[in-house]
Amino acid sequence: MSLNTKNITIDADRATTIVAPNNAVLQPISFVRGNEYIVLANVYSNASSTELVPLSIYDNFELIIGRTYNPSATPVTLITDQSKFNNVTDYPQANVASGILSMRVNVGSNALTTDIGNNTSQSYTMEVILTNNVGGKVMLLDTTATIINCIQI
């Protein structure tokens, strides 16, 4: 497995990825099956702002990639281990209180292999959820992620 870096910009108001601050154009996310990524995320208050959203250092995070409209389907990627989030050895600039996050995402699981089969790619929903000690779970990101399959030929 190789380690890759992927930069994303989150519009916290719409819980989606955008091209850049002050640019509301949606930014697609793609991964290659079998790789591990460090996803670097700057969280902005809305699509027309350059103001980062401060988050609580007490929040826990989850990252889920799966088929949203099939509740019986197992997510193809599920990350709940808090050591995979905001680890300064992965990304020294990670700073939850300043709205700069990092997530270590392994895009290789038995569930993904079974689900993607021999398709060249598959679109999924990627969600980043934070657990706020006061208000419960908060959706930080809900966007489409495409996983490109690696098929041995």
Image (cartoon, helix red, strand yellow):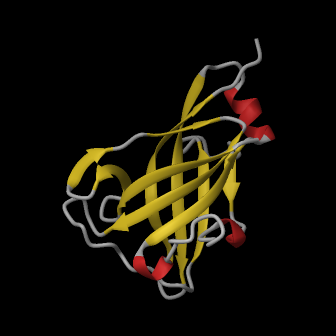
| Above-or-below relation of 7 to 149 | below
- In the figure, is residue 100 to the left or right of 107? left
Residue in front for this viewpoint, 144 or 23: 23
The percent coordinates of residue 75 (x first, y second) are: 67, 47
The percent coordinates of residue 23 (x first, y second) are: 22, 51
- In the figure, is residue 43 to the left or right of 86? left
The percent coordinates of residue 138 (x first, y second) are: 47, 71
The residue at 57%/66% (across/down) is 91
Toward which corner of the image does residue 98 lie, by quadrant?
bottom left
The residue at 68%/59% (across/down) is 79
Residue in front for this viewpoint, 89 or 31: 89
| Above-or-below relation of 17 to 2 | below
The percent coordinates of residue 62 (x first, y second) are: 61, 64
| Above-or-below relation of 28 to 103 | above
The residue at 32%/50% (across/down) is 18
Image quadrant holding the C terminus, namely top right
Residue at the far top in the pictured view: 153
Toward which corner of the image does residue 55 lie, by quadrant?
bottom left
